Image (cartoon, rainbow, N blue to C red):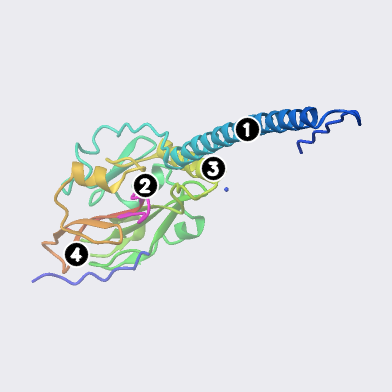
């Protein structure tokens, strides 16, 4: 019979004057007037033509600038080279892991103390709990780690033994990465640059088997058999636990407008 796990919830004026002598013939006056009208018409046509050309040039320039800004919004100047050992596919249910500063931590194996020793930037208040007791079949409270202004991590750990453990002795059961923003075409260019800079900075420290700039199409091309997906940007790959009630695996959440990854959780149960 499967056990019930008691877990913490993760949470854009043309002027012309014609003068003639008083004794000029009407024919001369008519000729002069006609000449003036023709000259005015020619010059007016030239001005109109120049205006049209200038408008066309302005429109072309504006469209070019707009296209450039749109491309900048979705630009992801982050080179992705996964840490060796993370797996050959984006979803690997037999090797659920991540790397921080080049060191790999595998769910179901690494302990909280391992992550602390590896320099994960945990919230200092959370670290006050590391010696708390955890009963068997229980998970720890949530541990938060801030990578930079826009990117964060969350963790939980589990006691799967038959006895009691301290939180620092429990093994990793959940790792979640999320970002506050992903680039958007309707954002100002400066904001998109800041978002991409924060993602690039995060990728210098944190690595999964997939890039942080992953799109839904890229995920489905690489790992084409999700167990569940919906119209809200969620794609899941899960398996049932052999010991506990429930399932675990990968839960990707993509931005509904850009289809770029904004949140991913990897969970583990024996």
Task: Determine contact: label 1, label 2, CB under 8 Å.
Answer: no
* Closer to viewer: mark 4 or mark 2: 2
Nearer-N-terminus badge (4/2):
2
Q: Nearer the viewer, residue 258 or 82?
A: 258
* Closer to viewer: mark 2 or mark 3: 3
Segment tinted magenta in the rendering: 253-261
10 Å crowding of disc 1: few (<14), some (14-19), many (20+): few
| Image quadrant in which you'd find residue 2 | bottom left
Q: Which secondary structure type mostly characterizes the magenta part of the structure?
A: loop
| Mark 3 vs mark 1, CA separation in Å | 40 Å
Residue annotated with mark 4: 162
| Mark 4 vs mark 2, CA separation in Å | 23 Å
Where's the C terminus, which quadrant?
bottom left
Nearer-N-terminus badge (2/3):
2
| Mark 3 vs mark 4, CA separation in Å | 55 Å
137 left or right, relative to 175:
left
Residue annotated with mark 1: 45
- Residue 107 image point, x, y percent: 25, 50
| Image quadrant in which you'd find residue 132 | bottom left
Local secondary structure at mark 1: helix
Nearer-N-terminus badge (3/1):
1
- Tell me the tag on residue 115: 2
Nearer-N-terminus badge (3/4):
4
- Residue 213 image point, x, y percent: 36, 42
Residue annotated with mark 3: 189
Local secondary structure at mark 2: helix
């Amino acid at each position: 019979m499967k056990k019930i796990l008691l877990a913490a919830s993760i949470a854009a004026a043309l002027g012309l004057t014609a003068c003639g002598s008083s004794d000029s013939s009407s024919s001369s006056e008519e000729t002069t007037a006609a000449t003036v009208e023709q000259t005015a018409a020619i010059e007016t046509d030239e001005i109109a033509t120049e205006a049209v050309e200038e408008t066309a040039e302005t429109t072309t320039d504006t469209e070019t600038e707009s296209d450039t800004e749109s491309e900048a919004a979705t630009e992801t100047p982050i080179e992705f080279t996964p840490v060796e050992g993370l797996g050959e596919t984006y979803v690997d249910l037999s090797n659920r892991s991540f790397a921080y500063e080049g060191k790999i931590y595998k769910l179901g194996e690494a302990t909280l103390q391992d992550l602390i020793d590896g320099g994960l930037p945990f919230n200092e208040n959370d670290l006050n709990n590391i010696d708390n007791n955890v009963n068997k079949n229980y998970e720890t409270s949530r541990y938060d780690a801030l990578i930079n202004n826009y990117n964060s991590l969350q963790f939980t750990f589990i006691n799967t033994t038959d006895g009691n453990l301290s939180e620092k002795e429990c093994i990793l059961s959940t790792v979640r990465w999320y970002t506050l923003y992903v680039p958007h075409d309707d954002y100002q260019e400066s904001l998109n640059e800041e978002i991409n800079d924060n993602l690039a900075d995060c990728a210098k420290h944190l690595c999964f088997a997939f890039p942080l700039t992953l799109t839904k199409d890229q995920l489905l091309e690489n790992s084409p058999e999700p167990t569940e997906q919906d119209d809200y940007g969620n794609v899941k790959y899960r398996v049932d636990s052999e010991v506990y009630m429930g399932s675990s695996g990968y839960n990707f959440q993509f931005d509904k407008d850009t289809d770029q990854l904004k949140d991913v959780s990897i969970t583990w149960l024996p």
